[in-house]
Amino acid sequence: MSKYRIFVLAGTATLLVGSLSALLGGWSPGLAIALGSAAALFAATLHAHRQRQRTLRQLTTCLHDLAHGHPVHALHTAAPPELKELVDAWNYLATTLPEHIRHLSRERALWRAILDHTGEGLLVVDPTGRVPWFNPTAARLLGVSQHTQQPLSLGTLVHHHRIIHLWQRCQTQGETQEDVLELPATRRTVRVRVIPLRHDDTPHALIVLEDITYVRQLETTRRDFISNISHELRTPLASLKAVVETLRDGALDEPTIARRFLTHIEREVDTMVQMVEELLELARIESGRLPLRFVPVPVTDIVMPVVERFQPQAERAHLHLSAHLPSPSPQVLADPPRAQRILANLLHNAIKFTPAGGEVQVTVTPRERDVCIAVRDTGVGIPADQLPRIFERFYKVDRARTGEGTGLGLAIAKHLTLAHGGRIWVESTEGEGSTFYFTLQRATSP
Ligand code: ADP
């Protein structure tokens, strides 16, 4: 009820009381008006008191809701003048707060997503050595579940004394600590940085785990490559040097011996030239600088020319070489000379590693999306523990036995198959033979 209406009511009451008393009781009108005014004043004061009490109660409830994180709302009741400013301030807060909260929640969700998807493992460590938070990458690197009951101690999570020492040094010195180590659970090589966090009085630390396994593998591959190539070149170069010295020491004057040595020199030089050419080709395929021209072609046109080319070689080695193709021949999407090169490298090995009297078979199997070409031999086979490395550059199972090869044939076959969007693999039993498989994608009908 507004103040204006109260005073109107009170005035009306005063007039009525005055008039009635004058009419009925014969009171003096002045006394009646005084009594009426007092009654009106009392009523107004009582009403104002009640309104103030109600507003204060409502404000208390609102603040209670705010303190307990419940949704808040504006007050729409009329406030007494002394509380009006307070109610207005509350109403402003109640209308703007939800938007602030929404904004903060969005920002929090965004940061959460960034931290969850970052490629680095992140762990926050509190001053007591407990880990209140870590991201999924850290969980993956450490081989633990992200939903482990938290907070766990740093030691339980990382299982590595060097990380704990880094954290302890960071605590005492207040400076970032760094190290490179291998995580025991997942065998990943990581660069660990422990960074002091000084956002409040409790000195937390942030542990950053950067997975550098791949970089380390690349470094190892590069080192192996350099050592392999040096080894491959040293042998023919040493042999050439010995031959040249022998010639200079007198063999040059004996034409038969000189001619034999010249043939030897030529063979060594040919091997080195072939190796350099294959290395260059491999580098071109790997870097994508060898442009492949894919055309739809019947798989017979890939397989048969190679099989026919190797037929005389197989006969000389007393091997039975056969090809088994489906009819009609499925179409594949391939760069024909490069696809033939894959098969040629596999056939060359099959013939080289199969003793006389053995068998070499090329089989073509059409599948739903691709065509699988298998080269099976009944040769020496490959020991099971060597199979995973067989497609590496320069890898040879038995260096003494396969001395004349460059060790690059399978690496080239692998990279050419990958460039065709296919897969290459091997199954072998030592002493019984090997089967090499590679796939070419089917040409989709136009
Ligand atoms: P290269 O034949 O020139 O030595 P490759 O890369 O073609 O090089 O082959 C690597 C090694 O894999 C060979 O040295 C040999 O030890 C092994 N290998 C490849 N194919 C066969 C096969 N069909 N049977 C047995 N061993 C094989």
Image (cartoon, rainbow, N blue to C red):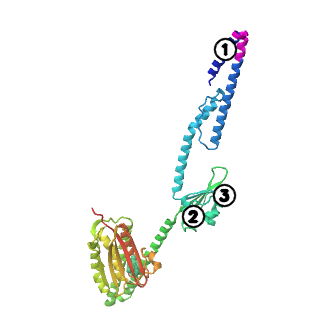
Q: How far apart are marks 1 and 2 (CA)?
A: 90 Å
State the residue lying farthest toward the front: 24
Going 34% across and 68% down the picture, which residue do you hit?
Answer: 370
Q: Does the residue labelled 1 lie within 8 Å of ligand 1?
A: no
Residue, disc 2: 142
Q: Which of 420 and 444 is in front in this view?
A: 444
Mark on residue 59? Answer: none
Going 72% across and 14% down the picture, which residue do you hit?
Answer: 34
Q: Quadrant of the N terminus?
A: top right
Residue, disc 1: 16
Left or right of 59: which side holds 292? Answer: left
Indicate which disc, 3 or 1, sits on the residue closer to the N terminus: 1
Residue, disc 3: 171
Going 71% across and 22% down the picture, which residue do you hit?
Answer: 42
Question: How would you rate the neighbour count of disc 3 (Cα within 10 Å): few for under 14, some for 14-19, many for 20 or more?
Answer: many
Q: Nearer the viewer, residue 370 or 402?
A: 370
Q: Say above or below: 136 vs 305.
A: above
Q: How far apart are marks 3 and 2 (CA)?
A: 22 Å
Q: Do the residues labelled 3 and 1 touch (CB within 8 Å)?
A: no
> Which amino acid is tagged 3?
Gln
Q: Position of residue 349 (x, y in %)?
A: 36, 80
Question: How would you rate the neighbour count of disc 1 (Cα within 10 Å): few for under 14, some for 14-19, many for 20 or more?
Answer: some
Q: Distance between the residues labelled 3 and 1?
A: 85 Å
**Looking at the image, is mark 3 or mark 1 nearer the viewer?**
1
Q: Does the residue labelled 3 lie within 8 Å of ligand 1?
A: no
Q: Quadrant of the C terminus?
A: bottom left
Q: What stretch is highlighted in magenta?
A: 23-37
> Which amino acid is tagged 2?
Leu
Question: How would you rate the neighbour count of disc 2 (Cα within 10 Å): few for under 14, some for 14-19, many for 20 or more?
Answer: many
Q: Position of residue 120 (x, y in %)?
A: 53, 59
Indicate which disc, 1 or 2, sits on the residue closer to the N terminus: 1
Going 55% across and 46% down the picture, which residue do you hit?
Answer: 105
